[in-house]
Amino acid sequence: MEEQGLQVNHEVTSRTNSISEAWRRLLFGVLLACLVPAASAATATANQTLSVALGPIGKVAVVQSSVLLAHTGTIFADFTGSITVQYELRTTIASGSSSLTVKAGSEFSPATGPSIARGDLTYTCGGATIGAACSGSQIVGTGSQTSVITVGSGACTGTGCAGSNPDSAIVNLTLVDNPAFKTGTYSTNLIFSISAL
Amino acid sequence: MKLNYTSFSRFFKPAAALALLSALGALPAFGQFGPSASTNVSVSVGAEASIQITASSTPLTAGSGGAFSSYTGTTNFLFKIRTKNSGSITVRFSEFLPNTGPKIGTPASGDALTYDTVIPGGTAYSAQTASTTTDTIVGSFGTDARSVQAGNAGTVTWTLPNDPAYKADTYTANATFTISAT
């Protein structure tokens, strides 16, 4: 019986210890829960420097996929037409520059009419709000590129810049109407290029 | 390692598609911005013609062949022409004024105003009789006739008989030249 009583007492003691352990864990959990909000209310700052190197760049697009030069005025007056060229650019602040140029990608075809090599196709420039448009009448060439717009250093297009984004230039084409041209339809291709430093 | 067709195709089909897309991306489509852009320029050159009289008037003067020699004079003109099929230059007159002298519309026998032409690049005509009611031929052009850019120089030499019946005076008529091309 004594052994049984001891066993009972032991069971009671053991159960009491278990309950006490449960209370300790519960109390620890409550304390931890109280501590967590206190920890989240703390603030800290950290700094990170971000830098980006914006280099010079230029891009160009032509609004019209094709242009038909047409007569205006009297018979054998020049054929005329206009091309709108859009461009985006950024030039280096101190020593940069940008150049928008044009050249003919090919001679007029067929060969019985106007000739790029003979200087039959010329143009004037205008409309640009950034940079300097070409001065006077320029002759379109097949080999060399001729100027449309030149832009100096520290220039950019867009908000906060001198010009809108994209900026636009108008190229006014003039083609001589030479009676020596055989009747027919003639075509060539003009290539506009932009560079930025 | 053995590479069967299925695994090869599985790898290279996407690779080829990617390469193609990359290549297309490298070429800016029309209207898109790129380092360069191009446009086609074309012109339709049709038949045209124009004429310019270089002097405002042509005096007819008596020849040196003696009394009542015919009056002669030359009208110079420049013409530009480009034909696809054909072309022509014609002339029509107003009547001489005052009406007491030579007549173009209803001349007396042997008193008609006649002319000879020189037409570089075209066909010239001789001994043509001027008219006030119809366009008479000065020159004609065939297929693909083309003058130089500055214009070809043509001439018409007029001959007006000196009829004693004409009252002494100064007589004036107007000649209108017309050039056309098709």
Image: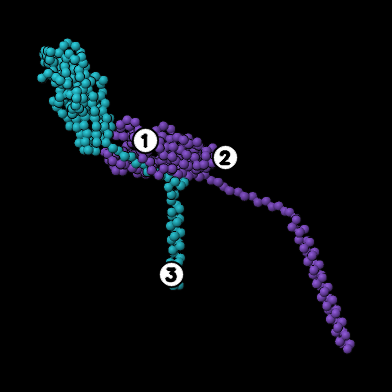
Chain colours: A purple, B cyan
Q: Amino acid at mark 1?
A: Thr
Chain letter behind tag 3 = B
Q: Residues within 10 Å of mark 3 (few under 14, many from 20)?
A: few
- Can see residue A63? yes
Q: Amino acid at mark 3?
A: Thr
Mark 1, residue position: A80
Looking at the image, which residue is at 84% across and 81% down?
A: A11
- Can see residue A94? no
* Structural distance between the alpha carbons of marks 1 and 2: 36 Å
Looking at the image, which residue is at 46% across and 44% down?
A: A60
Q: Earlier in the sequence, mark 1 or mark 2?
A: 1
Could you tell me which secondary element the residue under label 1 belongs to? strand
| Position in image of residue A168 (x %, y %) | 47, 39
**Of the two numbered discs 1 and 3 in the rendering, the one whose residue sits closer to the viewer:** 1
Mark 3, residue position: B6
Q: Is residue B41 above or below residue B167?
A: below
Left or right position of B166 against A108: left
Left or right position of A113 against A27: left
Q: A105 or A68, which is in the foreground? A: A68
**In the figure, residue A101 lies in which quadrant?**
top left
Q: B171 or A87, which is in the foreground? A: B171
Q: Which mark is residue A160?
A: 2
Chain letter behind tag 1 = A
Image quarter in which the N terminus of chain A is found: bottom right
Left or right position of B147 against A1: left
Q: Residues within 10 Å of mark 2 (few under 14, many from 20)?
A: few
| Position in image of residue B30 (x %, y %) | 42, 47
Q: Is residue B43 above or below residue B177?
A: below
**Furthest residue in direction bottom, as rendered:** A1
Q: Residues within 10 Å of mark 1 (few under 14, many from 20)?
A: many
Q: Amino acid at mark 2?
A: Gly
Looking at the image, which residue is at 29% across and 43% down?
A: A110
